[in-house]
Image: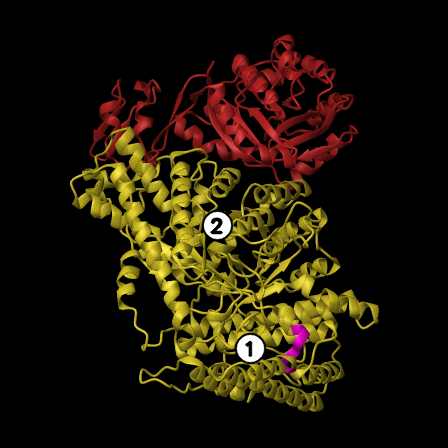
Chain colours: A red, B yellow
Amino acid sequence: MPGMVTSIQRFSLNDGPGIRTTVFFKGCNLRCAWCHNPETIRLQNDLLAYPEKCIACGHCVPVCPTGAHARVPSGIAFDRTKCTACGRCAEICFPGAMELAGYRRTGEEVLAEVTQDIAYYRDSNGGVTLSGGEVFCQPQFAKELIDDCVAADIPIAVETNLCWEFDAMRPMLEKLSLVMFDLKLWDDAEHLRWTGVGNALIKENIAKLDALGIPLIARTPLIPGATDNAENITAIAHFLAPLKNLQYYELLNFNPLGESKYRALGLENPFEAARPLSAAMVDPLRTAAAAAGIQVKVG
Amino acid sequence: MMIQYINQYPEDEQFDYAKRLRLLRERKLAQTEEKIQKEGGLNEDDYGRVVAPDYFQFQIVPNNPDGKFYGYSGWTENYTKLLAEHPLYVDPLDAFVGRGFFFLIRLRGIGWNPAYPYDELKVLFDKYDIISGIGRDHHFNPDIKMGLELGWGGILKKLEHYRSINPPETYVFYDSEIAVVKSIIQFLHRISYQLSEFALIERNPTLRKNLEEMADINYRMADGVPQTLREAIQWMCWFSMLSRLYNRGSAGGPLDQLMWPYYQHDIQNGIINDEDAKFLLGCLFFNDSRYYQLGGPDLEGNDTTNHLSYLILEAADAVNIACNLTVRVHDKTDPVFLRKAVGYLFTNKNGWPRFSGDAALVNGFMRCGYPREEAIRRISSGCHWMSIPGKEYTLNDIVKINNAKVFEVAWNEMMAGAEHSLKKLHSLFGEHLKRAVEATADGIQFHLKYQDQNEPELILNLLSHGPVEKGCDVTKGATYFNMCVDGTALATVADSFAAVEQRIVREKRLTFEELDAHLKSDFAGTEGEYVRQMLQHSERYCQGNSLGDEWAQRISKEFSDLVRAQKERYPGLNFIPGWFSWSHTLLFGSHVGATPNGRKAGTAINHGANPHPGFRRDGAVTAMCNSIAAIQPGYGNTAPVQLELDPGIGETEEGLDKLVSMVRTLLNSGNTLLNINIIDGEKVLEAHKNPSLHPDLVVRVTGFTAYFSMLSKDFRQLVVDRIIDKRSV
């Protein structure tokens, strides 16, 4: 069955070992306040509006079934409250002022794209990474892609928040060459506050995942005022320390690149003023994590 | 008259190699700055050339009423005169002398002997915007090894021997060549004498000793055969200068193989150590940045990387200027060496080394009918080209057809006719491409017939197999004639066909007539801009399995077949297709109106075999490299990949590993040549605003590395636009 994909990034160098292709799934079960890919949160289409690219050609006006676009003296006005994100304007907006986030793709189509770089995966020990959004929000599509890649002898990895019933994920996890998972906050209440869900299930799943014997990379985004305290990082690192298959623990510095997407989606960005942590702020956190006796990287 | 830096330092100043290289580098950068100030933007190699001192002006001696000189007598007279007058450039910090101030061809002016007109061909050259190669020179590889084994004395004896056994009609050739070689020997004796004099007055003992050594070496190298590494490099420096001085001849050789016996000799006899060797090699790069190949297979397929290959990379790192080093990557390439080579790209960000793909090049050349051994001997020698040292005459990287112009002619003819269809457009494009390729081959044949009456290759003939033995110019006496015919604007044309197919034929968003009106108005008005954006967002070349990719493969095949077919029209000549625009992207683009790929009138065509910028949203290198691999003509010439990468990618060991893998994979996947710029974006933008801020910033422009500040403003803008384009993705 087709799935919702926001983009397919080839020659991806930061989503696992070697040279990879990363498939970004749309839809997420968490609502992290700092999400830097806000267009991947909803499972449904989203319309991104970039008025600075508009040339006022007016082609969007007649194709919109709800009258969300209108000619005004200054150009074209877009009324998001009327928009259903059907994508008809984006389809003919070649200047790129209207873009649809999320396209239906069949497994076959995705496979046709990712297999083009097989030679690069082979030489570099790379492969395909499924990312998001949250991959397991589309379990059937995820299963199809994982099976297809395994059949094509392409190593496949997943980036996930692990906030799912383990037995639902297990058949897919077992086929992966690597799992990159997030544990953003140690404290359950804080996790609930910042992401909309508690973390008990995630912690439980991490232990179960380790039993599968698959290489693991654990990650925590360093979010100013939310996750970037030594107490949080220390607690997570000590929790991770006993894992047999953990390759390393990665601290991901805050990524401000979501700002323009929030504007394009017409959403408020709670972390609008936030900036990446300085080296002086990251170093103590790295040290705190490493004190648990695990390998730590900063991404 | 001379440029010399005698007694620049106190008697007690101490010098080690690092200091000497640093000072030489500072001087080199100052000279680059001087070139920019005096000569302005030059979109070409550095050549190691120095601006001539104000007091030395060379006056050519014309032998034609047009004020120029032609043929054996004209070139011999002017070259020997120039050598007799040419000032010595000597720097006591340097291990070598060998700097030149001129290219005689530019003092005369590129041109053609008016006694041999070709007006009919010119009509077609203009119609299809063809750079014909008529009257153009060098761009094939001399056999440096032969020169090192013979020395100038041996070359002179060889000429005299063959003159004695060949008929009188060859004497004009021999007498010219003998006069040239004698003048070279005289010139080198003069140099040696002057060096001895400088040694007497230099006050610093280290530099004085160096001058004494240089005087001795140059005395021996005037007519002798090199025995040591220093002598061999000095011989190469002079050959390089003498060849440049004549007509800018550029090709080097397999440097690690050429110098290996001398290095071994010196090491075994305790003459030098590795630090000495690196210093000597560093000084070679200051003297000239010819195209040198490193590594690659021997005739049995084993890797030839040796200890000297590593030292050459380290020496290039130590001087860190524009170095045209090419690492030849094959299935047994030393992985440590490859990693080291890729690492220098990132640590120095100066566009060196680049990488050639042995498998595709060797297999391709064999498809021309040559045995594997000859294909392996064919080494990387120029911007985008390969050549067997001493055996080929090629006009490599000279002959270009502007296929965007061919497309425009076809489009206009279709629109003037009754049938407006993709089939008709493709058919007309094929017909005009055939005429363009045939006219190009006619031009090559014409060039070969009369070039010796225009500009005989008096220097490169000496290190070619055939001319000296037969008594004729290399244009008539080469062992092989493998004539390079490069297509350009592949992406421009392929994307144009794809846009027409997608937007007019499949989607019916436009008609041919509407598109024609937009092209003629250069996409004027809001609707014009909308249509332009629509066309530009069609399925493009290098997206991967796109309509643009299909068209690019089709056009490349059609072009290659037409070029290959010319050997039937001209038996004895072999024509080899490639895709390379060199730095003509702006020039060719300026001759073509708006095109259906959404390109505005007069703007650049695509670069070499690369896509137009913005070809994919993710800019995926792998997609681009796969597509370029799929359009390779496949006969031993190249369609290079030109990559611009962010310096951050290679900052970690893991990142570097990934890039090494990328280089290996793309070259093992059918690609022929890889040029990489590690773009320090901020630095490039700053240098564009004020070139003198970063006189040492080197970018790989097309096949060659050049100082960014030496590029013309338009060409700098092109590099800057690519950076901005990458940032907006």
Up the image or down, A250 lies above or below B567; here it is: above
Q: Which amino acid type is marked by label 2?
A: Ala
Q: Chain of mark 2?
A: B
Name the quarter where the N terminus of chain B is drawn: bottom right
Check residue A260 for magenta coloring: no
Q: Which amino acid type is marked by label 1?
A: Leu
Could you classify mark 2 by the number of other residues whose Cα lies within 10 Å: few (under 14), some (14-19), or many (20 or more)? many
| Image side of residue A232 versus residue B113, left or right | right
Identify the residue at image location x=21%, y=29%. A71
Stretch in magenta = B148-153
Per the image, the residue denoted by label 1 is: B242
Could you classify mark 1 by the number of other residues whose Cα lies within 10 Å: few (under 14), some (14-19), or many (20 or more)? many
Residue B195: horizontal and vertical position, in percent? 66, 87
Q: Nearer the viewer, residue B379 or B538?
A: B379
| Image side of residue B624 versus residue B64, left or right | right
Q: Main secondary structure of the magenta part?
A: helix
Per the image, the residue denoted by label 2 is: B639
Identify the residue at image location x=21%, y=35%. B511
Q: Is residue B439 visible?
A: yes
Label 2, secondary structure: give it: loop
